[in-house]
Amino acid sequence: MTFRSVFDAAFIRTEFDQAGINTQFIPSIWKYVVQNPNCEWREIPSLPSAAYSLLSSKFKPCTSVVDSVLDSIDQVTTKLLIKLQNGASVEAVIMRYDTRLGKYGGKPRPGGPRSTLCISSQVGCKMGCTFCATGSMGFKSNLSTGEIVEQLVHASRLSPIRNVVFMGMGEPLNNYNALVEAIRVMTAFPFQLSPKKITVSTVGIIHAINKLHGDLQNINLAVSLHAPVQDIRCQIMPAARAFPLEKLMNSLAEYQKKSQQKIFIEYIMLDGVNDEEQHAHQLGRLLDTFEVVINLIPFNPIGTLSKFGTSGDEKVTKFQTILRSSYNIRTTVRKQMGQDISGACGQLVINLPNKKSPTLTDIEDLHL
Ligand SMILES: C[S@@+](CC[C@H](N)C(=O)[O-])C[C@H]1O[C@@H](n2cnc3c(N)ncnc32)[C@H](O)[C@@H]1O
Ligand code: SF4
C-alpha cells in the first residue's frame, strides 16, 4: 500500500479539512516527526482521536529512507542516498563549508557549523544538458512535495542546515507545484528556513520564471546560463532551443524588476567551448544592465558520459578578471567539493528502480 508523506502539505490539509480535524495540528505533527522520524503516530501527544486514525490509514512520518551515507575524505561533504517509496533513489548532498567562518577570525562559528543542503527535485531530468550526469539518465519521475522536504528532514539529523540549494538531480522548475509547496513548508514552522537562504537553480524555463515571483518572494534565483550566445548554448544545452537566450534574458529582466533582487548566474567552464576571452566579453555585455553575481563552475568530469574537458586555472582566472575589471561584475569561482564521493554538481546519477537496488559501488561506477 502506498502512503503519503506527512509533509505533502496540500494533501494533508485537504484530508484534515475533509475529516473535520483542525489543520492547526499539522505544524506540531511536523515538529514531532522532525525530532522522531521513525515514530509511531500514537506517540504524538495531544491529537484528536480522528487525527490518529487518519494518519495511520493514509500517512507515513517519512515515506523515504536513507539507504547510505557517504562522507568525503575531508569530512566537508556528505552524500545521502535516499530511497523513495516507488523504489527510485535520489541523492542529497550536505556541504559543511561555512562561508561565514572568516567573520569569526578562523575560529569555529558560535553554535557550530551551519551547512548547505543540495536537494534533488526529480529522478533524472529531461533537459539533457550534455555535460550533466543526471541529464544522461533522461526523465524518470517528479518528486512529491513531501519527498523534497524529507531530504531536509534526513539531512537535519546529521547537520544543522542553514541553506538549501535546488542544485541536485532534476530541473526544479519542471516540477513547479511541488517545488513551490516544498519551499513554503521549509520556510514555515518547524523548519523556518529564511527564504533568503534558499536558492532555486534553473536551466531557464521561461514560463515558470515568469510566475515564480508571484508564488515565492525573497528566494534566490540562479540561472544556468553557461554560454553568452544562443548557438553555443544550443550546442551544449538542448533546452536552449525551446528557451532561446534572448527571450530568457527578457524574462530575467522582468523577474529582476519585480523582485528587486540579484540574480545568480552559473557558468560552467568547458575547455575550448565557452571559456575564451571573447566569451567573457560577450557575457559581460549580455549582463551589463543586470544586477548579477556570476559563479564560474569548474566542469566536474563525468567519465564517458560527456566529452568535455575542464578549463585550466589560468583560463578561469583570466575569464574572472575580464568580468570583474572590464564590466565590474562580482564573479566568483565555485569551490570544488565532494568530488571524491561524486557528490559534486552534475555528478549525481542513480541506478534505476526495478533493475535492482543500487549499491554505492553501482553508483560510483556510473559516475566515473
Ligand atoms: C545539476 S543542476 C540542477 C539544477 C538545474 N537543473 C540547473 O540546471 O540549474 C545544478 C548545477 O550543476 C551544473 N552542472 C551540471 N553538470 C555539471 C558538471 N559536470 N560539472 C559542473 N557543474 C555541472 C548545472 O549546470 C547547474 O548549474
Ligand atoms: S544541468 Fe540541470 S537541467 Fe541540465 S540536465 Fe542536469 S539537472 Fe537537468
Image: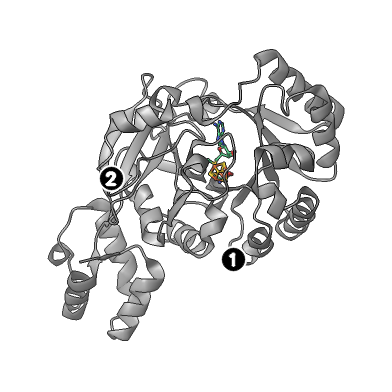
Q: Are marks 2 and 1 in contact (CB under 8 Å)?
A: no
Disc number for residue 342 = none
Camera sees residue 22: no
| Local SS, label 1 | helix
Give whichever of discs 2 and 1 has the lower sequence position: 1
Q: Amino acid at mark 2?
A: Lys
Drawn side of residue 109 relative to residue 157, left or right: right
Mark 1: which amino acid? Asp
Tell me the distance, in whole angstroms, between the alpha carbons under discs 2 and 1: 38 Å
Residue at position x 38%, y 19% in the image = 74
Q: Which residue is mark 2?
A: 355
Q: Residues within 10 Å of mark 1 (few under 14, many from 20)?
A: few
**Residue 289, percent across and down?**
85, 45
Report the side of 320 relative to 217 (left or right). right
Across and down, in percent, residue 31 comes to 30, 59
Instruction: Name the side, left or right, on which 201 lies relative to 185.
Output: right
